[in-house]
Amino acid sequence: MADEKKETIVLGVVGADCHAVGNKILERVFDEQGFKVVNLGVMVSQDEFIDAAIETNAQAILVSSLYGQGELDCEGLRERCIERGIEDIILYVGGNLVIGKADYDETERKFKAMGYDRVFRPDCDLIEAANSLHQDIRERFGEGSGK
Amino acid sequence: MAYVMSVDIGSTYTKGALFGYDENRTAPMELLEKSVTATTVEHLPAGFERVSAELMKSVPAGASRDISISFSSSAKGGLAIYALGIVPELTLKTAKLTALSAGGKVVGFSSYKLTAKDLRELEASSPDVVLLAGGTNGGNESFLRHNAKQLLRSDYLRQRATIVFAGNEVLAEEIPEELTGAGFDVRVADNIMPEIDAINPQNAREHIRDVFLQRIVKGKGLDVLVSKVGKSPNPTPYAVISLVEAISKYAPDFGEFILIDLGGATTDVYSYAREHHGAERVVYRGLPEPIVKRTVEGDLGMRVSAHSVADFVDEVTAQDPEFRRFIEIINNDTSYLPDDERGRAYDRLMAQTCIDMALQRHVGTQKRVFTAMGDAFIQQGKDLRAVSKLIGSGGYLSRADDFIYSGESMAGVGALSSGEQVYLVPQHIDYCRDSQYIFPLLGNLVDDLAERAVLTALESLT
Ligand code: B12
C-alpha cells in the first residue's frame, strides 16, 4: 500500500483536442516523480476533470491544451470547481495555450486571472514542474497531505 | 431419466415447470409439464405446494419422488434499494447499475451530500437496502463521512433497513463500526468503483442478494419453504441475469444478444454485448459498463403502466377515442385480454412502444463533435447497433405469436443528422420468443445444470 501516502493528480487534454503524445509523457514523468496520476486522456471536458478529482480526492488538476483553443476551453474551470465543492484544488495548465507565438507573459497573466495557479510553456522543464507541484501541495494542504 | 423442478413465485402468478434430462448426456432438457396458479400472497407456500403437487403428477411412477427443486421469488417486485454516491456520473451511476444487477429495484437515489430533505425522501421511499457508495479507494472521504452521519439520524433505517457499505475502502471499518455501534444492520462490500475507470459491482451484488434472502425469506412463509426445499430462493431478475450470463459462457456461438422481459408494470432489458467496437474517430467517455447489463423501466409495461405508455405512442393514435377507451379498460382490469383484432393491434402497439422506449434508455449514445481535423464522435454507454438477436419474454411476449419486433420504429433515433445525439440501438433485428415462458425458470437451474439450462433455453426459442 505504498500508494497511500502519494499525492493524487488528475491529468488530461481539455476540449476537442486530441494531441495524445504530450499527455503520455506527462503521465510518465509525474508518476516517476511520486504522484498517483489519474490520467483521463484526450478530449476531456471540464466536468470530467472535476468528477474525477472529487471521487479520487485529488490535490491538483493538470490541464493540457495543444491545439490553440486553450483560452476558450480553460475558462470557467475554477468557477466550476468552486461550485462543486473543491474550491481550493490546485490547477496547472500547459501546452500551446494560444494560437501562434503570442507573448508568453501576457498568456500567463490571462490564465492566472482565470484561476490557474501555474502556467507552463510547451518547452517547460517537467521535473521542475513536478517539484513545484509537490511544494504547492505542501503549502496549500500541509505536510503529508497525500492520502 | 432424472427430473428437476423450478418454481417462480411472482407477484401475481406462481409458475412452475418440470424438466427431465439424461444424466449421461449434456443435451437440452425435456419440458414435461408446466403449471401455474395465483400467488397466495399471504402465505406463499400454499401456491408453491399447489404448483409442485401438480407437477409431481407428471413424474412417472417408479421414478424417485426425491426431486430437486429450485425456486425464485419476485416478492415485493424485488428488494427496494436506495443508491447513494458522490458524483452522479461516477459512483452514483455505478451504485444504480449494481443495484439492478443484483435483481433489486432502485426506489431512490442521491448524490454529493445527503441533505435533511433527501433523508426524508429516502425514508419515504421505504428502502430495504441503502447502498452507500462514494470515492475511489484512497479517494474522497468527506462526502461519505457526511452521508454516513446523516444515515445515523434515521430511526427508520436503524429499524427497517440494511446498509451495504461499498465505498472508499479507507473508511470500510470506521463507518460500518459507527453504524453498527448505533444499532444499524450493516454489511461491508468491496468498493464498487475502486478506481476512476474501473467498476467492480460483483461483491456488492452478492451482499445485496444475501440481504434479499435474509429479509424476504422471513416474510410470508418463505422460511418454511426454504427449510423444506433445502435451498434459498433467487430474486427473479437475478435468475434471469444468471441465465443470460450462462448463455454467453456456454453458447458462445449464439453471440451477442438482447433479452426483453416485458411485464404488466415494468420492462426489463438485459444485454450481453461488449460496450465498444473500436471504431475510428470515436472517443469513449464515462464509466465502462458491464458486459451483461440490466436496466428496468418502471413506467413501461402492458397493463399497470398503460397510462404512461400511452404518452409515448404516435399522436394520431393517442387522440383516437377507441385507443383511449382501450387504455381505460386495461387500466381498470389489469388481467384483461382483448378478444378482437382491434384490441390485439393495440396490444402490439403497446408492446412495440415499451420495447422502443426501454431500448432507447438502455443503449449508449454518440454525439458528433466538430474538430479542426474533421468530425469525431463522443460515445457514452453501450453500442448495440451491430447486435441483431432480440429475445422477447414475459407474459405477453411469450404468448404473442402475432407480434414481431422489427425495430423499424426506432430508425429515427438511430440516424445521425449533424450535431445531434444518436442512440446506439440495433440496426437490424432478428426477433424470437421465449415461447414457453421458461427463461426465469431455467435461470433457477443455472447453479446446478448450467449447460443443460442454456441448451434448453436456446432450443425453446421460436
Ligand atoms: C502530431 C501533431 C498532430 C497530430 C496529433 C496526433 C495525436 N493523436 O497525438 C494530428 C495530425 C492529429 C494533429 C492535429 C491537429 N493539430 Co497538431 N500537431 C502535432 C505536432 C506536429 C506534434 C505534437 C506532439 O506530439 N508534440 C510532442 C509532445 C511531447 O509535446 P506537446 O504535445 O507540446 O506536450 C508537451 C508540452 O506542451 C508540455 N505540456 C503540455 N501540457 C502541459 C500541461 C502542464 C501542466 C505542463 C507542466 C506541461 C504541459 O509537456 C508535454 C510533454 O513534454 C505539433 C507541432 C509540434 N511540433 O509540437 C502540432 C500542433 C500542436 N498542431 C497544431 C494544430 C493547429 C493542429 C490542428 C488544429 C490543425 C491541423 N491542421 O491539423 C489539429 C487539431 C486536431 C485536434 N482536434 O486536436 C498546432 C497548434 C497551434 C497552436 N496551438 O498555436 C501545432 C503546434 C502545429 C503548428 N505549429 O501549427 N496534430
Image: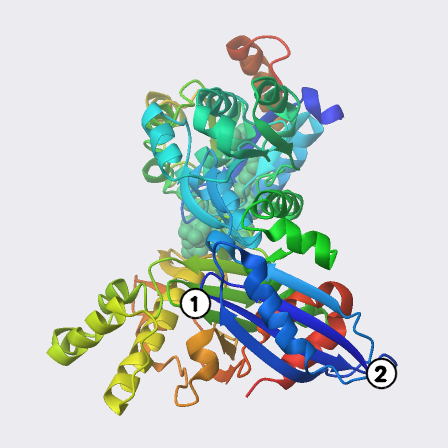
- Mark 2, Cα crowd under 10 Å, few <14 / some 14-19 / many 20+, is few
Q: Nearer the viewer, mark 2 or mark 1?
A: 2
On whether ligand 1 comes within 8 Å of the CB at mark 2, the answer is no
Residue at numbered disc 2? B25
Mark with earlier residue (2, 1) = 2
Q: Quadrant of the C terminus of chain B?
A: bottom right
Which element is circle 2 on? loop
Tag 2 and tag 1 share a subunit:
yes
Residue B410 visible, this angle? no
Residue B332 located left or right of residue A47: left
Which element is circle 1 on? loop
Residue B243 visible, this angle? yes
Q: The disc labelled 2 sits on which kind of residue? A: Arg
Between B289 and B23, the one lying in front of the other is B23
Residue B70 located left or right of residue B153: right
Residue at numbered disc 1? B424
Which residue is pictured at 40% across the width and 20% down the height?
A87
